[in-house]
Image: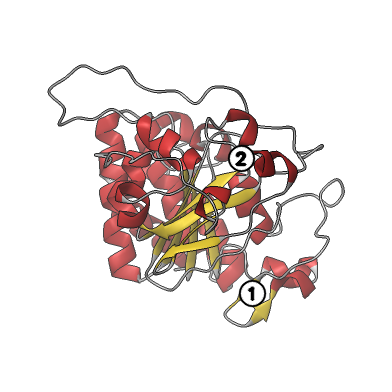
Amino acid sequence: MRGVSFHVQRGECLAIVGESGCGKSVTAYTLMRLIPIPPGRIKKGSIRFEGTELTHLSDRQMERYRGSEIGIIFQDPMTSLNPVTKVGAQIAEVLVKQRKATRRSAFDRAVDMLRLVGIPDPERRANQYPHEFSGGMKQRAMIGIALACSPKLLIADEPTTSLDVTIQAQIIDLMKGLQKKIDTAIILITHDLGVVASLADRVLVMYAGRIVESGGLDDIFYQPHHPYTWGLLASVPKLDSSKCTPLVSIQGTPPDLFKPPLGCAFAPRCEYAMRICHEECPPEFPVGSDHSAACWLEHPMAQGSGQEPEASNA
């Protein structure tokens, strides 16, 4: 990551959006110290959770936070669940390790979690293996594992990937309900702007390991200021449009972060790029209340692009 900084409050949903390979998942795994060291390393910076500096903790100390204080829904439930262990036992394992619960009480809690996430006949399902679950039920089971210890922070890494739209809607409604019931803070990692519009309070737009724009949900969707954000919004189908307009794609590919560019990483793909964009990385410019964009177009001396992005209906 390159200078990434953000915060999330209890009961809030913060969405991190961007293309594949922009650093969303790496950011999440870094927060939980799940990036293997080596090859990964934390050169500098701070990760603070309720006043505790996580970068100073030993691996054993960090284990007390994983699952207990910070839960995570991994990207692919098809491969994240252990195929040879019953689903109820996988949920109970978290409680036995983190809460020192007995196996009987932990299994009873696992059944309650399956019921909480909307899986029918949870007593029977707790004694089944992952291959006996549908894709949507596996995702619900993953949410149950992540929430078993009632964590204060939940990281949801692409929670609706590979699910059909009906199941996606059910998972979104489930997360909304659980957030209100448990008052858990959520960091939502996704490239699906429709999911963002349904869940998020604030949005971070990430590109090439940097946050290029941040703001409230309405700020990002209706008053975007960064050309990359414009491109993301333009690629979303407009459901209320009476015209059949082609979707706009962002030409080019993200840069190689092993050799990051000297200036703005988006400059080679940006039709509004100026000379300075290729020479110097832009700072964050405030463009509103709690809304900022890292783009030279926002510099007071810039003439602006003249583009007025249309409101998105994601």
94 horizontally vs 150: left or right:
right
> Type of residue at label 2?
Cys
Image coordinates of residue 154 in percent, x first then y, are 48, 60
Image coordinates of residue 250 in percent, x first then y, are 49, 26
When the figure is inspected, residue 152 is found, relative to residue 130, above or below; the finding is below
Query: In this orientation, does residue 82 appear?
Result: no
Q: Residues within 10 Å of mark 1 (few under 14, many from 20)?
A: few
Residue name at image x 55 percent, y 47 percent:
206
Question: Which structural element holds mark 2?
Answer: loop
Image coordinates of residue 178 in percent, x first then y, are 32, 61
Query: In this orientation, does residue 142 appear?
Result: yes
Direction bottom: furthest residue: 51
Image coordinates of residue 133 in percent, x first then y, are 39, 33
Q: Which mark is residue 22?
A: 2
Tell me the residue that label 1 is attached to.
48
Direction left: furthest residue: 242
The answer to whether marks 2 and 1 mark residues whose Cβ atoms lie closer than 8 Å is no
- Front-lying residue, 31 or 214: 214
Q: Quadrant of the C terminus?
A: top left
